[in-house]
Image (tube, grey):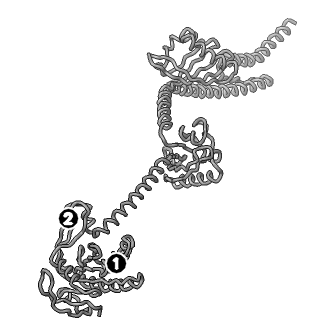
Amino acid sequence: MFRIIGYRHSSCIITSHWITQPILRLSAAAGAIASGELDQKVELGNVKELNILALSFNKMAKQLQESFDELETRVQQRTASLTQAESELRGLFAAMTELIFVKDSQGRYLKVVSSQSEILYKPADEILGKLEHEILPSEKADIFVGYIREALQTQQTVQVEYSLMSKGQEVWFSASISPITEDSVIWVARDITDRKKTEEELIKKEAYLRLILDNIPQQVFWKDTNLVFLGCNRNWAEAAKLDNPEDVVGLTDYDLLPEAVADLFRAKDRQIMEADQEELHHIDVKQKPGEDGQKRWLDINKIPIHDEQGKVIGILGVIDDITQRRQAEEALRIQQEKLRIEQKKSEELLLNILPQPIADRLKEDTRAIAEQFDETTIMFADIVGFTPLSARMPPTELVKLLNQVFSLFDQLAEQHGLEKIKTIGDAYMVVGGLPVAMPDHAEAIANMALDMQRAIYQFQADVGEPFQIRIGINTGSVVAGVIGIKKFIYDLWGDAVNVASRMESSGVPGKIQVTAQTYERLQDKYVLEERGVIKVKGKGEMTTYWLIDRH
């Protein structure tokens, strides 16, 4: 009995050992995994159920190892990404020119971030943890705290600009204040001092430009490409009946002008911008009733406006009221016209006294003029019977009659290109070949003499008076000129003149007596008859001829 019991006890121990060994190995592997030793594998035994458990454990251990490896890889990747992000963030902060503060609702500086410590109004370690009122003047601190509370209350970003004194100079900042928690904000400030200085200079320049624009006499305006007014100066605003130059902004020509005029102006403006070429044009403006009612003249110069790339972005107009100038020009024109008329009258009067070339010379030089002319033909004509006529005719009628006769002679002299010298009582003197030389001077004098005879014949028939003329002609050299300083007269001197006068006085009424010198020049073209030898005072005996007619 004792032996049987012992045997059974020994068998149980063996069986127990056979079962517990795999369990112990499984437990040891689980403990190792729990300690971080994931690379575990449980060997299989003889117990089927324990083998199933070991296989599951080995599979789980493998999956766990793989998961851990994957996790470790991810951690490494994440760590590398974080390292790169941290590096980029550090570089970003280093490159930033902004000041970044984190502040609470009381204005306490919780964090200070800036790579540009020189633009901090105080070093970072002196402001960290302190309130605005401990750092800034009370008035400025109140304003800053107000910005923070506005951002926290509205939960919206507040945009502000402010200035602070830093190192004895005014520094301007543009700040964005954004809530990050219920009790704190992030304050990002950028140094805009240079921009502010530029803006201030621009404002000064604009003010200076405005001062110039408002004080020049011209009217100035400018429009965009849609022909909407962008601005004008005070003179233009006043002309457009606007209270202020700013009132024109946003208006168009149709808001200020009649539709037809606005259509013309806008068409012209578009043409100028499309052609990209300035243009000056004139307009006449009639003032409205109630104003001065006078016509006004305007010059409008329109110039395309360009951007930096040369693109047309609008048009500039400069209007100049030239009414006074035009009125002055008109008055000057009228005055000049009057002077011209008076000058013309004076010149005509002068030309009635002097030949044109002599008058021109006398205008430039008032000294005596005397010239020798070798080839001239002189004619004297006398109205026969004029003295008895003057005894029975009123003086005014007599002068009127004489004027009619001599006017006929003047027309003939002009017709034949001859120069009338003078009249002496009822005598008429004319010459050919001066002051401008002419090759046919003798023929011209002969033609005039014959025409004078016919004119007198017709005239006496018209007026019923028995007029006749006695004419004498001679050819030779003379001296002609103007002497004296008053009452100028162009006259002739010389023996040829005296002989011509003797030809007239020794002639016969109704006939034309010529000398041998004149005969030689006329004999081939005219009908002449020898009178014979006559006695001439101062010359003795001379052979003379009668001019009868043309061939």
Residue 486 image offset from top left, x and y in percent: 24, 60
Q: Earlier in the sequence, mark 1 or mark 2?
A: 1
Q: Residue at x 65, y 26 (%)?
A: 71
Q: Nearer the viewer, residue 70 or 518?
A: 518
From mark 1 to mark 2, how far is it between C-alphas?
35 Å
The tally of labels here is: 2
Can you say whether 360 is above or below 385 in the image?
A: above
Q: Tell me the element at label 2.
A: loop
Residue 335 image offset from top left, x and y in percent: 42, 54
Q: Can see residue 406?
A: no
* Residue contact at pointers 1 and 2, CB within 8 angstroms: no
Residue 455 image offset from top left, x and y in percent: 36, 83
Residue flagged by tag 1: what amino acid is it? Leu
Q: Which residue is mark 2?
A: 483
Q: Which residue is mark 1?
A: 389
Can you say which quadrant of the picture contains the C terminus? Answer: bottom left
Q: Quadrant of residue 430?
A: bottom left
Residue furthest right in the image: 1
Residue flagged by tag 2: what amino acid is it? Ile
